[in-house]
Image: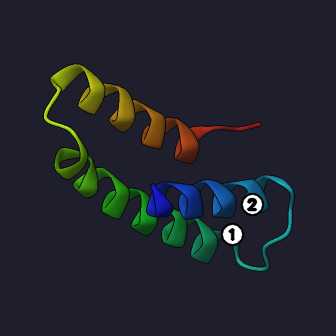
Amino acid sequence: GENAGIAFQIKDDILDGEVQSLDQAEAKALKYAVVAKKSISKITKDPKMEKLLNKMVDFLIERTK
């Protein structure tokens, strides 16, 4: 959860125009998202929950608002 939260905050800062380097911020957000996704299988063994959590992490990175 912590890595997904950090990825969310970085994306939020990007959307708010609060970053100096967009490329660096995007790369950093993606790094945290990858770590978050790797952790999901350790959190749950329920395939539906795993799919939902993966979609949530994708949304955090791909959102435009």
Locate the C terminus by quadrant: top right
Q: Is residue 57 left or right of residue 43?
A: right
- Say how many tags the image has: 2
Q: Is residue 18 left or right of residue 40?
A: right
Q: Is residue 50 left or right of residue 4?
A: left
**How many angstroms separate mark 2 from mark 1 (CA)?**
7 Å
Disc 2 crowd, CA 10 A, few/some/many (<14, 14-19, 20+): some
Identified at 34% across, 37% down, the residue is: 54
| Element carrying mark 2 | helix
Q: Which residue is mark 1?
A: 22
Image location (x, y in percent) of residue 52: 36, 26
Check contact, mark 2 vs mark 1: CB within 8 A: yes
Q: Nearer the viewer, residue 40 or 11?
A: 40
Q: To which quarter of the image does residue 64 belong?
A: top right
Q: Which residue is mark 2?
A: 14
Q: Nearer the viewer, residue 23 or 57?
A: 57
Identified at 86% across, 56% down, the residue is: 16
Disc 1 crowd, CA 10 A, few/some/many (<14, 14-19, 20+): some
Q: Nearer the viewer, mark 2 or mark 1?
A: 2
Q: Which mark is residue 43?
A: none
Say above or below: 58 vs 23: above
Say above or below: 51 vs 21: above
Image location (x, y in percent) of residue 62: 56, 41
Q: Of the two numbered discs 2 and 1 on the same chain, state the one appearing first in sequence.
A: 2
Q: Amino acid at mark 2?
A: Ile
Q: Amino acid at mark 1?
A: Leu
